[in-house]
Amino acid sequence: MSNRWTQMDGDLPLILPGKVARERGTRGVAKNVPAQASSHQKQDLEPKHHASPLKLTSASRSKSDTAKHHNFMQVTRSKTRTSYHEFMPLDQAGPAVIARDNMNDRAFLAIKRVKRVNLEPVYCVPDFTSDHLVNIKDMFLEGDDEIVIVYEQMDVSLRHIIAVTGGPLQAFEIAAICKELVGGLSYIHEKLSLYHGTLSCSNVLLNQDGKIKIANIAESILERKVFSAERGLADIKRIATIMIELMEPATSILDPSSTVLKNPQKWRDELGIKDFLDATQRNSLPELKTVSIPSTLP
């Protein structure tokens, strides 16, 4: 193929969330899913510099604490019910609660609580906004041993999609997902200097606009998963296990760690999807971006 996967248009009608995932079209694509902007049209929203640290302290919260600085976010001890109205539990790459922001635009958010893994009084947490990650909107201490993480709300995971569709995705859908996974891991490794460590279909999430994002980055930050070449390669290899679940769900159920197709003949060589699967086992992220993969609808 002449086009590389990094040049693929972003306006593919991806399957997606909620009820639309049940209404797949004749080519296995959900109907009425909003199109994404073309990669040639949208501006690069990623910061051009490394993320700046923000401090997580146990100081009392003041009115100014809610304002966002250009490089820092003030994160302190607070009461959830003051800032956020929690009203419904959900699964967003793990247990969470849907909430409304009482202090800003009344946006829907997802609140998760984790036990403190480090009892130092101050944490350094990067303040960033990424198009590839489920972004952290707020973070604060609750009690003596719990950290509250406020994420943007997403709608469905890849695992939910496979459960609803009951079968493999199409090659161009998998291509779009892999593109976002490579972009997300590149951001985590290169700009946050972290590794994810638990990448899977359950923590790759999508919203109603069809945007694909990697979840649970705050856990990597709090657990201090500092990047190394070995850890980075392990993250990349997890793309293969995700691909197997999307291509052969039954194989993944029998062996969740499998990176080998049981029935490779079902995927035409010219699609390039098998070449990309093989490349995840030996190539770096920059090298993966040069591997040909479907750029058009079948």
Image (spheres, rainbow, N blue to C red):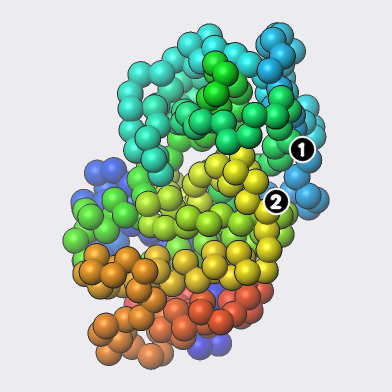
In the image, residue 225 above or below residue 263: above
Look at mark 1 in the image and give the residue it sits on.
53
**Residue 192 got which mark?**
2
**Does residue 219 appear anywhere in the picture?**
yes
Would residue 7 be found to the left or right of residue 125 on screen?
left
Residue type for callout 2: Leu
Number of residues whose C-alpha sits closer than 10 Å to that of mark 1, classed few (under 14), some (14–19) or many (20 or more): some
State the image coordinates of residue 226 (x, y, percent, origin top left). Answer: 68, 53
In the image, residue 7 above or below residue 132: below
**Does residue 168 appear anywhere in the picture?**
no
The answer for how far apart the CA atoms under marks 1 and 2 are is 10 Å
State the image coordinates of residue 1 (x, y, percent, origin top left). Answer: 50, 88
Mark 1–mark 2 CB contact (< 8 Å) = no
Q: Could you tell me which secondary element the residue under label 2 belongs to? A: loop
Q: Could you tell me which secondary element the residue under label 1 belongs to? A: strand
Q: Which corner quadrant of the image does residue 188 belong to?
A: bottom right
In the image, residue 80 above or below residue 29: above
Question: What number of labels is visible?
Answer: 2
Q: Residue at x 27, y 83 (%)?
A: 262
Residue type for callout 1: Pro
Observer-nearest of 72 and 121: 121
Would residue 130 be found to the left or right of residue 82 on screen?
right
Residue at the outermost front position:
119
